[in-house]
Image (tube, coloured by chain):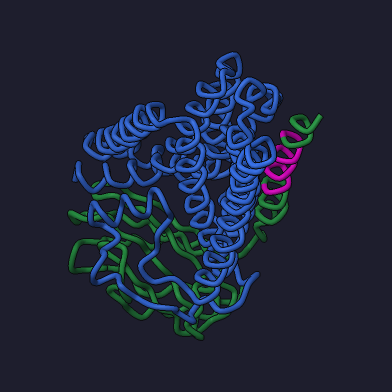
Amino acid sequence: MSGHRLVRLAGSALVAGNVVALIACGGAEPGAPVSRIPVEATDHECRVTPPSAPAGTVVFEVSNKGTTTTEFYLYGPGGEVVSEVEDIGPGTSREMAVRVDQPGEYTTACKPGMRGAGLRGGFTVTVPRAG
Amino acid sequence: MLFSNGLIGLREGLEAALVVSILVAFLVRSERRSALPAVWAGVAAAVVLSVVVTAVLVYAVGRMTFRQQEIFGGLSSLVAVVFVTWMIFWMRRAARTIAAQLRGKLSEALQIGPLAVAAVAFVAVAREGVETAVFFFASMRSAGAGSVQPLLGLLLGIAVAVVLAWLLYQGAIKLDLGAFFTATGCLLVFVAAGVLAYGVHDLQEASLLPGLHARAFDISAQIPAESWYGTLLNGIFNFSPDPSVLEVVAWLGYVVVVLALFLLPGRVRRSVLLLRPVRARRISS
């Protein structure tokens, strides 16, 4: 019966999505540094402190202190979107964890009002110290 | 603070609420109230699954990377498009049955299992579910830290979405049967086209599809995403003020093909039916 098939289709699509996510999330390399970078977003400012981190996992802790919904983006050296968090409502905080393996000059952006190029700033990913 | 967070809840809740209300109206109009519990079961399953998936995947096991998030969002959108399209053609069959003046056979033509009904409701809600659950957890955390407004806003926004969907249901239920199927079917074509464009956008962000930066147009100055009308357009039709060319192509392609398939056969059928009695009368006179 077609109903059964449809449910199974939906189920397997969701399961497949989860399995993909689990496989790809599972292997956090031991030894790769994890940096926590607080980001304070307001309607007119996007304070990323400090604006640099060693290559590895970077966790941006974005808190929206403004009055309008915002988004947070990290762009790569080539301008491509490395990661984004949408729908950060005023008064809420969201974490964005990113694996950045390539040192270089990245760009962060807060987008109050969820539009435009956003409030941009440089973000330097450095070579992690050996050891 | 309340308002902005409320708009997020409205946007996330609206599309699911509309699809579910059309589904309910459809079942009521086609005298299949017995399938209604299946709809609510589908909705409940999607809500529970969204919360569990979010709690486990996002917070306990580890975070999804941006690419995984976008692939998940893109693929679940495509699954939703398949289901809503199926629902559209199911409505077309109903409209054609009416056009053929076989009203008595309507519920017979609509013999669809309760599982299929549950699946449509499930997919409609699950698509936005994880995103909403993530936001829900974030606003719970703010509430824990003493700021209740984001949580209140989210809940109010979802409540408004449900009220709007209920109003649509009340309106739809009053239409005559033929107009009901045509109107709700057409509305669903545009809803599904929006979901398709949204899915394409996600897959472009995941770099599975090219052309993320090739913008077709940008009217975000005229229709800000954070305005109430921008929110409504986005909530119902997944309207984006600055879509990529590929999003627009997918949207147009879907609307043209599906709307034509939805509307044309019904018309042909009706005109054929109109011709027959005329001919019959001529012969008899």
Q: Nearer the viewer, residue A118 or B265?
A: B265
Tell me residue B23's x, y (percent): 52, 31
Placement of B7 over or under A105, stated as above or below = above
The answer to if B259 sits in the magenta stretch is no
Tell me residue A17's x, y (percent): 68, 49
Q: Residue at x 38, y 49 (%)?
A: B235
Q: Nearer the viewer, residue A52 or A43?
A: A43
Placement of B195 over or under B243, stated as above or below = above
Quadrant in which residue B39 is drawn? top right
Placement of B14 over or under A96, stated as above or below = above
Left or right side of A88 for B261: right
| Farthest-out residue, front | B285
Tell me residue B103's x, y (percent): 60, 25
Q: Colour of chain B?
A: blue
Q: Tell me the magenta residue range.
A: A7-17
Q: Nearer the viewer, residue B68 or B94?
A: B94
The answer to if A10 sits in the magenta stretch is yes
Query: In the figure, the green chain has which letter?
Result: A
Q: Residue at x 69, y 40 (%)?
A: B283
Residue A1 in sight: yes
Q: Nearer the viewer, residue B254 or A29?
A: B254
Image quadrant for the C terminus of chain B? top right
Residue B65 in sight: no
Left or right side of B12 for B251: right
Report how many numbered discs are placed on residues in the image.
0
| Farthest-out residue, top | B34
Quadrant in which residue A108 is drawn? bottom left
Placement of B238 over or under B38, stated as above or below = below
Tell me residue B280's x, y (percent): 67, 38
Q: Main secondary structure of the magenta part?
A: helix
Q: Residue at x 30, y 73 (%)?
A: B219
Q: Residue at x 49, y 73 (%)?
A: A81
